[in-house]
Image (cartoon, grey):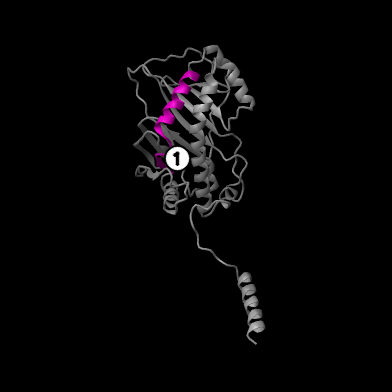
Amino acid sequence: PAPPPTPDVLAGALLSDPDPDAARTAVGAAAESGAFRVGGAVDAGEVRAAVEAAEAVFRAPEEVKRELGRWFRRRDRVAGEEFYWFRPATASSDDDRVLDAALPGSTYQVFREKMEIVASKMEDLAQCVMRVLSDNARNPEDSALSTGAASILCLTLYNCNKLKTHWSEFGSTNPPNSYALSIHLSGRDQEICLRNQSGSTFFSLPAGSMLVTIGKQIQEWSNGEFKNAVGEILFELTDEPNPFISLELLYSPGHLRLPDVGRHARCIDHPKTVSFRDQILVALVLLVFFYLFWR
């Protein structure tokens, strides 16, 4: 089969205004390749500030990472570590209290402040995409999505030319294998590989732009109308001393049924229809007025 096309690019504001043309483009891309890009979604400076705060989290002592095995995971030699930030994150949650107490100084407070700005925009986009897809699916399942896992913002630390971590324990949290949407975001221009059932394609994701890919939950819910796709960061070992951190939101809509997600916010205008019963009632009312005032 032919490789999947390069994902369409939508302006960041178009999906949230809402804009019917942008919504149709998103629906078409989800059906054709399972992915599309959203340009200018986040200020690149905000992303870089959040990434800098995340670097301090990854610099936590090894014994702290072992203690926080639910949040930290070790990967391969290139993608050295992952930090799972479970969403939503609030200052009053048990997770926040544990992280704030375990990470040195104000590391977690600064991280939460900077990363929340970025994460909330990623979630806003995810919710709008869910509305668009639920409004326009032709033959969706009537049952609710299977959403056992919470949404997770996955931060991946890519080591440059050396493996800097020495702790051998793997985290206790397994990466979710089923989610509704994945959203990639980078603070710099980044090469991406997009894979779906048709093959692979390569393209550049500009700084501050997002790549939206359809997860298995949406593919199953839409009876295959929307295609599952996976985006992968392309990273090469270099001599640069600074690490690279990528952001990926694995989004699940919680307990919501997809038809309910879109019922309150229509992103594409549809023709309005009046039922036959309502037409009869209107005709009777008009007939009564005619006899009352024109006799």
Quick one: quadrant of the C terminus?
bottom right
Q: Does the rendering let one see residue 5?
A: yes
Q: Does the rendering let one see residue 223?
A: no
Q: Is residue 150 above or below residue 110?
A: below
Q: Amino acid at mark 1?
A: Val
Locate residue 177, reporting x and y percent: 53, 34
Q: Which residue is mark 1?
A: 212
Left or right of 104? Residue 164 is left
Q: Is residue 183 above or below residue 69?
A: below
Q: Residue furthest bottom?
A: 295
Q: How many marks?
A: 1
Locate residue 285, reporting x and y percent: 65, 76
Q: Nearer the viewer, residue 43 or 181?
A: 43
Q: Is residue 237 above or below residue 195?
A: above
Locate residue 87, reporting x and y percent: 57, 32
Locate residue 44, reporting x and y percent: 40, 32
Quick one: quadrant of the N terminus?
top left
Which residue range is magenta in the image? 34-57
Q: Is residue 51 magenta?
A: yes
At x 48%, y 54%, the residue is 268
Name the secondary structure under disc 1: strand
For disc 1, the neighbor class at 10 Å (few under 14, some 14 to 19, many from 20) is many
